[in-house]
Amino acid sequence: MLSKTAQYALCAVDYLARHPGEPQKAREMAAGTGAPTAYLSTVLKSLKRAGILKSRPGPHGGYELNVAPEQLTMLDVVDASDPLPRFEACPLGRDEHAHALCPVHRCVGEATDRAREVLARTTIADLLSEGESCAPD
């Protein structure tokens, strides 16, 4: 249900939360999360624009969380990187569905709403408390 972009964003935030106070370069995070460096750099810029990350230039610079893990939800990260779709109207633009979603899109919309609820109530700190990271073995 989550795009690669959203998954990489979540893994990058998880990685940074596990290295508090230690600025991380994009290539270090790419190696630590298994994400392609160029792709991850784009994701990190989106997270910075959203205020989730801050960065410092220079040899000792890099990215850090700008929001405490206890205050940052998974939904915040997903919405900043690649939001889940919301179906208010037929995504296919079909005229016969102009007044109501068809059963397929209504069901997908309900599933997406439930996913958003779970992501909204799960903080990055909750993920840290479970011990395992998003990084590959």
Image (tube, helix red, strand yellow):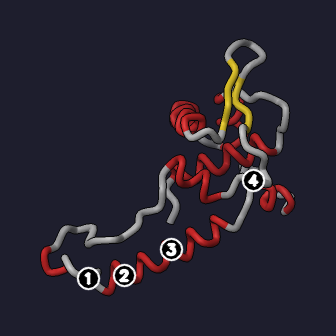
Residue 129 placed where, x, y %?
86, 60
| Foreground tag (4 vs 2) | 4
Mark 2 Cα shell of 10 Å, populated few (<14), some (14-19), many (≥20): some
Residue kind at label 4, given as amino acid type: Gln
Residue kind at label 2, given as amino acid type: Arg
Question: Which of the 4 quarters of the picture holds residue 17?
Answer: top right
Asked if disc 3 and disc 1 are in contact, CB closer than 8 Å, the reply is no
The tag earlier along the polypeptide, 3 or 2, is: 2
- Point 47% across, 61% down: residue: 84
Mark 1 Cα shell of 10 Å, populated few (<14), some (14-19), many (≥20): few
Q: How far, Cα to Cα, is label 1 from label 4?
A: 36 Å
- Point 68% across, 57% down: residue: 73
Q: Determine whether, in the image, residue 102 is placed left or right of residue 35.
A: left
Q: Can residue 96 be spotted in the picture?
A: yes
Residue 61 placed where, x, y %?
74, 20
- Compared with 36, 86 (above or below) is below
Q: How far, Cα to Cα, is label 3 from label 1?
A: 17 Å
Report the front residue among 61 and 33: 61
SS at mark 4?
A: loop
The tag earlier along the polypeptide, 4 or 2, is: 4
Q: Determine whether, in the image, residue 94 is placed left or right of residue 16.
A: left
Residue kind at label 3, given as amino acid type: Asp
Q: Which residue is mark 4?
A: 71
Residue 113 has which mark? 3
Q: Which residue is mark 1?
A: 100
Residue 28 placed where, x, y %?
71, 30
- Point 27% across, 83% down: residue: 102
Asked if disc 1 and disc 4 are in contact, CB closer than 8 Å, the reply is no
The tag earlier along the polypeptide, 1 or 4, is: 4
